Image (cartoon, helix red, strand yellow):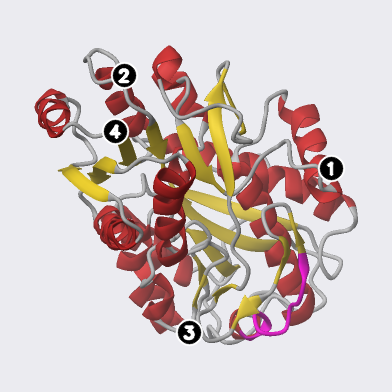
C-alpha cells in the first residue's frame, strides 16, 4: 500500500461498528480518514502521482487552518493500478475499515464501476472524481462525481476538431475499454451530426505498443486530422510512431492527455498537439492563480488538470464533512446541501441531485508549445 506524507496510518481500530454510525466519536481528536483507490504503479501511475500532489496541497491549507470540525483530514492511498480486479480488492478493504468515511477514485471508469456494487452495498460514498463514463453514477445513490461526462466531453471534442480547427475527414484512435468505446461512440455520433466524416477508426488495447499496421490503414484513408481518445502513455506512443510516417496532419486529443507524462514520453513529437481540456494555468481568475502559485512554490512545476481536479476534490470533501461530520450516510446526503464550493476547474461547484454530477462543466482549448500545455487562442492555424 502506498501512503502519502499526509496519510500515515494510526493503529487499526479494535472493532467494526455499524457502517451507518460515525466512524469516530464526535469528540475525537483523531484524524478523519479518506480512502483513495488509484494507480501509483503501472501505465497510469502518473495520474495517481498528480492526484497526490493536488490532495496534499489542499490538505496543507485545510489542516493548516485546524482541519474540519477540529480534526485533521488524512487519506490512505491504495495502489489499484487502475485495474478492475485490484479496485475490487481495495473496495473490500475500505468498506471494512471503520475509519474510512468516503472513498475517492478509481482513476478509470471501468475500474471504478467494477467496485461500485461493493461501495453501494456497504453505504460508503464512491466519489469517482475522474470518472467520465456516463453510466458511472447510475451504479447507485452512493456514486457521485465532479467529472464532466463523455456525453459533454465527446461532443465538445468533435466540435473543436471540426468546427474550430476545420478538420473534415477524421481518423480516430481509441482505447478498447468500456471508457474508450463509450467515448468513441458519443464522439462519432456527434462528429457525423455536425458534418465531419470518420474515415478510419482504430481500437487498441491498453498495453498495445506497436501501432504501425494501424497507422498504415489510417494513412491510406487520407484523413485531414487525427483524434486520440487515449491515455498519456499510449497517446504519446501513437504520436511518436506517427512522426515516423509521411502523414503530417493535425492531432487533436481528449482531455485525458493533459498530463506531464504525455509531454515527457512524447518529447518533440507531441509539439503542436491540440487538446480540448478543462484547465489552463494561464486562466486569470484569482482562484486559479492562487492555486497555480501555491503549486509552483510547493512542487516547482506547472500543475495539470489532474492535480487541479484532485485539489478541488479534497476541498469538496472538506465541505461535505463540515456539514455532515465523519458519518458515511450523512456525507452522501450532504452532496445535495453544499452549494457553490470554490473550484479551480469550474469556478464554483454545486451538484445535480438527479445525475449526482457537477452541474456546470466547461472547456478550454490547449496546444503543446515548447514542451508545455498552453492556451490556444486560435492564432495558430491547424497543421503540423
Tell whether label 3 touches label 2 (CB within 8 Å). no
Q: Tell me, for residue 141, which label it has, or none.
A: 3
Residue 306 sits inside the magenta stretch: no
Element type at mark 1: helix
Tell whether label 1 touches label 3 (CB within 8 Å). no
Disc 3 to disc 1, C-alpha distance: 34 Å
Nearer mark to the viewer, of 3 and 4: 4
Question: Who's the residue at 44% across and 38% down the image?
Answer: 257
Looking at the image, which is closer to me, 58 or 76?
58
Whether 201 is drawn above or below 106: the answer is: above
Whether 195 is drawn above or below 262: the answer is: below
Residue 295 in percent (x, y) is at 75, 35
Disc 2 to disc 3, C-alpha distance: 43 Å
Name the image quarter holding the C terminus.
top left
Element type at mark 3: loop
Q: Mark 3 or mark 4: which comes first in sequence?
A: 3
- Name the residue tied to disc 4: 224
Q: Main secondary structure of the magenta part?
A: loop
Residue numbers of the magenta segment: 333-341
Q: Can residue 282 be seen from the camera position used here? A: yes
Q: Residues within 10 Å of mark 3 (few under 14, many from 20)?
A: some
Disc 1 to disc 4, C-alpha distance: 40 Å
- Name the residue tied to disc 2: 240
Nearer mark to the viewer, of 3 and 1: 1
Amino acid at each position: 500500500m502506498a501512503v502519502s506524507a499526509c496519510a500515515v496510518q494510526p493503529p487499526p481500530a479494535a472493532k467494526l461498528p455499524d457502517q451507518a454510525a460515525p466512524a469516530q466519536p464526535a469528540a475525537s481528536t483523531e484524524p478523519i480518514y479518506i480512502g483513495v483507490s488509484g494507480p501509483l504503479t503501472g501505465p497510469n501511475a502518473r495520474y495517481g502521482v498528480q492526484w497526490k500532489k493536488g490532495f496534499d496541497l489542499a490538505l496543507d491549507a485545510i489542516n493548516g487552518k485546524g482541519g474540519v470540525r477540529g480534526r485533521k483530514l488524512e487519506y490512505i492511498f491504495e495502489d489499484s493500478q487502475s485495474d478492475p480486479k485490484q479496485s475490487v480488492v481495495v473496495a473490500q478493504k475500505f468498506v471494512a475499515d471503520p475509519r474510512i468515511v468516503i472513498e475517492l477514485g478509481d482513476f478509470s471508469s471501468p475500474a471504478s464501476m467494477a467496485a461500485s456494487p461493493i461501495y453501494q452495498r456497504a453505504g460508503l460514498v464512491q466519489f469517482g472524481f475522474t470518472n467520465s463514463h456516463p453510466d458511472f453514477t447510475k451504479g447507485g445513490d452512493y456514486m457521485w462525481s465532479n467529472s464532466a461526462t463523455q456525453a459533454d466531453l465527446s461532443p465538445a471534442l468533435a466540435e473543436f476538431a471540426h468546427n474550430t480547427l476545420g478538420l473534415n475527414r477524421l481518423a480516430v484512435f481509441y482505447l478498447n475499454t468500456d471508457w474508450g468505446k463509450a467515448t468513441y461512440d458519443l464522439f462519432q455520433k456527434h462528429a457525423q451530426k455536425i458534418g465531419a466524416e470518420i474515415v478510419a477508426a482504430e481500437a487498441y488495447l491498453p498495453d498495445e505498443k506497436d501501432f504501425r499496421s494501424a497507422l498504415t490503414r489510417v494513412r491510406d484513408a487520407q484523413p485531414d486530422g487525427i483524434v486520440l481518445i487515449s491515455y498519456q502513455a499510449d497517446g504519446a506512443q501513437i504520436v511518436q510512431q506517427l512522426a515516423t510516417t509521411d502523414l503530417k496532419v493535425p492531432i487533436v486529443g481528449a482531455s485525458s492527455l493533459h498530463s506531464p507524462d504525455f509531454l515527457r514520453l512524447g518529447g518533440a513529437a507531441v509539439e503542436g498537439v491540440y487538446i480540448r481540456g478543462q484547465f489552463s494555468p494561464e486562466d486569470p481568475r484569482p482562484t486559479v492563480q492562487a492555486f497555480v502559485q501555491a503549486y509552483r512554490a510547493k512542487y516547482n512545476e506547472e500543475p495539470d488538470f489532474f492535480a487541479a481536479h484532485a485539489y478541488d476534490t479534497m476541498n469538496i470533501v472538506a465541505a461535505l464533512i463540515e456539514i455532515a461530520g465523519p458519518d458515511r450516510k450523512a456525507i452522501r446526503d450532504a452532496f445535495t446541501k453544499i452549494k457553490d464550493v470554490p473550484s479551480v476547474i469550474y469556478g464554483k461547484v454545486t451538484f445535480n441531485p438527479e445525475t449526482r454530477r457537477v452541474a456546470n462543466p466547461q472547456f478550454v482549448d490547449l496546444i503543446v508549445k515548447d514542451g508545455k500545455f498552453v492556451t490556444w487562442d486560435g492564432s495558430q492555424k491547424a497543421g503540423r
